Amino acid sequence: MNVRWNSKDFKIGVLGGGQLGRMLIQEAVDLDIRLHMMDADPNAPCADIAHSFTCGAITNFDSVMEFGKDKDLITVEIENVNIEALEALEDMGIKIYPQPRVLRIIKDKGIQKQFYLDNAIPTAPFQLFKDSDAVANENLSYPLIQKMRTGGYDGKGVQVLKNASKSFNAPNLCESLIDFEKELSIIVARNQNGAIECFPSVECEFNPEANLVEYLFSPANISAEIAKEAMKIAEDVIKKLDMVGLLAVEFFLTKNGDLLVNEIAPRPHNSGHHTIECCNTSQYAQHLRSILNLPLGDTTLLFPGAMINLLGEKGYTGPVIYDGLDKILELPGVHPHIYGKSETKPFRKMGHVTITGKTLQEVRKTADQVKEKIKVLA
């Protein structure tokens, strides 16, 4: 007899124990759902608050098999996991969402881009290469973006090449440098019954040095037609993947008004943090609903919002100090989320702050004040 999803005996395993898992746990508590986490870092943000925590490498076949064999369902908070172990666990009858075949497509950016091409999903032109020979290819036009096919994360493994200079000496892809107007994101969820819900559009602003999201605003400052088209493409992507779970779809909006899919992430995403305060249903609650085949939640945006990533300041490494945290708590509509990481280093994600308000102008003004007042130091 199958154990019900809300039974105390139902075990959900999560590969990864970072801040995304931490916020997933916080939503799971409200439904009395028990999450069992695994991460290689004994001091991971989830270590002290998970129902159980296993210290182990999520990229190791034997470790993932041992962790997963007694679980009813397994999900992930990062793509860099041992897919072969998940496939073996799936063959044993354990539910894995997102499915291992989906993770295999997304984990390799080359396979991911080919998926877009094969399924008529708009994306930037690209070429695939095995190693550093990419820069010597006479068919390449500079400047371009070069990405490692696997292993890149949070801006790592991505670089702009202005000429035939230094290249990643690993499997990579080179794609045209898009002259874009904005970078957008749509988060979409799909459950086992095929029900789909999208969250409202998000506009992202990046830190140019770290290549990490610094600000995001929702709703994005775009036309209703472009917002509708972005949702339509996001729904098309998750349908064609036949994926169960939560999917972040990142777009370039070109200066000609075209939408191009840049990358996708099969899990809760940095561009959805604001949904905790700003939407009827957060992205974390929606992820749980989708993988458990529950009715998907209402994604209505209750009020405009912004999110600021709290990144470790340059020049500071060591035990973390959140300088100015008390000062931002004086501001209206400010909601800090501290990730519980004991050590900071330059550009490490240490937390985020959501700002809510009546208008985007009001939200942006407060966001600028927050950015000025709080620093992550050591």
Image: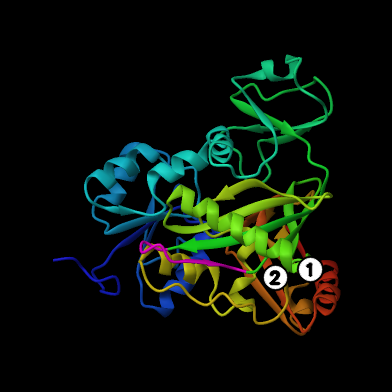
User: Is label 1 in a helix, a strand or a loop?
Assistant: loop
Which residue is at 79% across, 52% downward?
Answer: 207
Separation (CA) of disc 2 from disc 1: 10 Å
Which residue is at 80% across, 80% downward?
Answer: 359
* Pointer 1 residue: 374
Which residue is at 79% across, 78% downward?
Answer: 327
* Magenta stretch bounds: 191-199
User: Is label 2 in a helix, a strand or a loop?
Assistant: strand
Using residue 297 as the reference point, say whether residue 100 is left or right of it: left
C-beta proximity under 8 Å, tags 2 and 1: yes
Question: Relative to residue 50, is residue 42 depicted above or below?
Answer: above
Colour scheme in use:
rainbow
Residue 339, how many percent across, how many down?
59, 64
Queried whether the magenta region covers residue 132, the answer comes back as: no
Using residue 12 as the reference point, say whether residue 307 is left or right of it: right
Residue 44, how many percent across, how many down?
50, 56
Q: Residue furthest left?
A: 1
Residue 166, how many percent across, how many down?
76, 22
Which residue is at 76% across, 15% downward?
Answer: 138
Residue 284, how many percent across, how many down?
50, 68
Q: Is residue 312 visible?
A: no
Q: Is residue 275 visible?
A: yes
Queried whether the magenta region covers residue 196, the answer comes back as: yes
Q: Which mark is residue 353?
A: 2
